[in-house]
Amino acid sequence: MKSSEIKKHLGLNTEATDEDVLSALDMAASIVSTFRECGEKLGLHAQSSPKEIAALLGKRESTAVSELRSELVVMSEEVSSLREEVLHAHAVNYIERMMTEKFINDDLKEKLISLHARGEVELVKSMIAGLMDVPLDAFHKYKPPADNGTKNSPIDDEIKRNLA
């Protein structure tokens, strides 16, 4: 290859000196070395061409990737919300079941549901274990005695009116 062609490939004019050619070669070697280091840091193989490395460095996140990333964030938030709803529903179900066995007022019920939904299941169980049991017959409705033809007292009449 003629020296004029080498100078042309290095971006030099035909009147460049040998020192200019050596300087341009050193610069080119330095650029190639730097590109290869960048390529390796980006996960490319050591023999990647500077064009491949430059192409990878020049790529911006495509709109499709940006849209997918946004959808992933939205879906993650939805899953988190659904998880909270399921935990709350499970807590409500558990506490309402326990209300048939233990005396639990509405205020305590809400606190127990909140604790249970946050994952404090063992604390809730120990708190419920310390509550007083509901008697087995507590859920049977009051039935007044059958009228056997005798005259009722005024109190019995009042009770019947209130139960009706």
Image: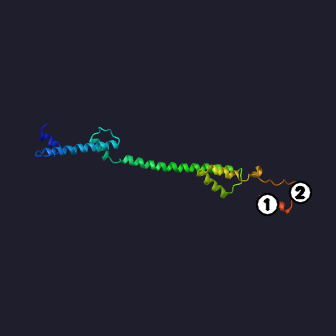
Left or right: 38 in relation to 101: left
Instruction: Name the residue carrying label 2.
Output: 150
- Give the image's coloring scheme: rainbow
Nearest to the observer: residue 13 or residue 77 = 13
Nearer-the-camera pick, 3 or 157: 3
Of the pair 44 and 26, the residue shown nearer to us:
26
Check disc 1 and give the amino acid type. Answer: Arg
* Residue for badge 1: 161
- Residue 135, percent across and down? 76, 51
Local secondary structure at mark 2: loop
How many marks are shown on the rendered structure? 2
Which residue does the image show at 54% across and 49% down from the upper left? 82
Which residue appears farthest toward the right when viewing the image? 150
Q: Residue at x 62, y 49 (%)?
A: 121
Q: Position of residue 69 (x, y in %)?
A: 42, 48
Amino acid type, label 2: Thr
Q: Is tag 2's residue or tag 1's residue first in the polypeptide sequence? A: 2
The quadrant holding residue 50 is top left
Q: Quadrant of the N terminus?
A: top left
Residue placed farthest to the front in the image? 19
C-alpha separation, residue under disc 2 versus residue under disc 1: 17 Å
